[in-house]
Image (cartoon, rainbow, N blue to C red):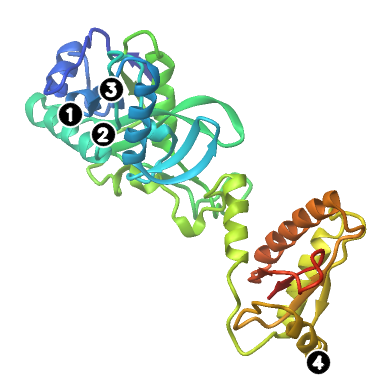
Amino acid sequence: MRLEILPVLGIGHVTEGDDLAAVIATAAPWLRNGDVLVVTSKIVSKAEGRLVDVPADGPERLAARDEVLAGETARVVASRGATRIVQTHHGFVMASAGIDASNVDKTQLVLLPVDPDASARALRGALRERYDLDLAVIISDTMGRPWRNGLTDVALGVAGMPAIRDHRGEVDPYGNELQLTQMAVVDELAGAGELIKGKCDQVPVAVVRGYLPATNPDDAGGARALIRDAAQDLFSLGTAEARAAGLSDAATLTDGPGPTPADLTAVRRAIDAVAEVIAPGTVFTLVDEAEVRAGLVAEMPGWPDGADLLLGSAPTPVEPLGLVRFGADLHRLRVALAAQGVGSTLLPPPPGSPASAALAL
């Protein structure tokens, strides 16, 4: 395979209502059947009128941007200072929901296309019907990536080719059957196109030639095929957000007939998990003997219905800093319990014992 990456020059300024098919075909009369057209999402958004007016600067601009961001956000994945990593209503996980202020007037923000797959299909259809060009179309945008510095372009929408090349079931040269390999080829092509588009050169369209022997009208669901199912997403939250969710989960009470041996094992694992990080003098004790627990429960105001077990502890020495450390230890244990699937709630100390505390499980 030999690939060429060609810039489409002379696109110029795109405004709402512009005919992208005509603009691109006029600028690139040399397009061929089987080319892959990589189109920056920004010009698609501009043509589709996905612009929002905001103040040019000052706190009013920041407030307006925050309001726009809230409207484009389906859920917050992570937040650090002014940075927001969110999942959009499309399902993409991106910084600031892909809202962009570059290559646009200072009083406007550019939003992502409402349906990038539909935008890709519409552009492909127009080029085919009016210019007899059978192309694949990728709508691309820039994203950051977990665990790696730097940005790269990825596909938000695609038409005319599948988003993923599935190698599962194929056999490598060593005779090994591939079981997991699925290549996000449209992301790779989007990144290749970005190499010549750049960010300041006003080249919003590139052509990758030589990849497709022929286009495929069955695009297998477009770029939505790239969005990982929530049940398979092991990193659906940032670390601080995951910890907060763990604490929230740990604050729920267990329901059922009572503790099983597996429950007791899970609690002991949680205790062991925090044993090396808790403050000296803090000892968590699992109380699973009914008579002992009944006596302790009698001292505990607000004992929750449905609780099965009790973990008791007290800081040593009893002084302000010790209490602070002890509170942190309690939170560590609740996270560890949540990781083991054990719910808990923090109980108030018994009357007359302000330094004691317990977890009900």
The reply to whether the C-beta atoms of the residues labelled 3 and 1 are less than 8 Å apart is: no
Q: Which mark is residue 113?
A: 2
Cβ–Cβ below 8 Å for labels 1 and 2? yes
Q: Which mark is residue 291?
A: 4
The residue that disc 1 covers is 48
Crowd rating for badge 1 (residues with CA inside 10 Å; few <14, some 14–19, many 20+): some
Residue at which label 3 appears: 54
- The numbered dot on residue 133 is none
Secondary element at image label 1: loop
Q: Is residue 53 left or right of residue 155?
A: left
Residue 78 in picture, x, y percent from top left: 53, 41
N-terminal label among 4 and 1:
1
Quadrant location, the N terminus: top left
Q: Earlier in the sequence, mark 1 or mark 2?
A: 1
Q: Is residue 138 left or right of residue 315?
A: left
User: Disc 1 versus disc 2: distance between alpha carbons?
Assistant: 7 Å
**Residue 158, position as x, y percentages in the image:** 29, 37
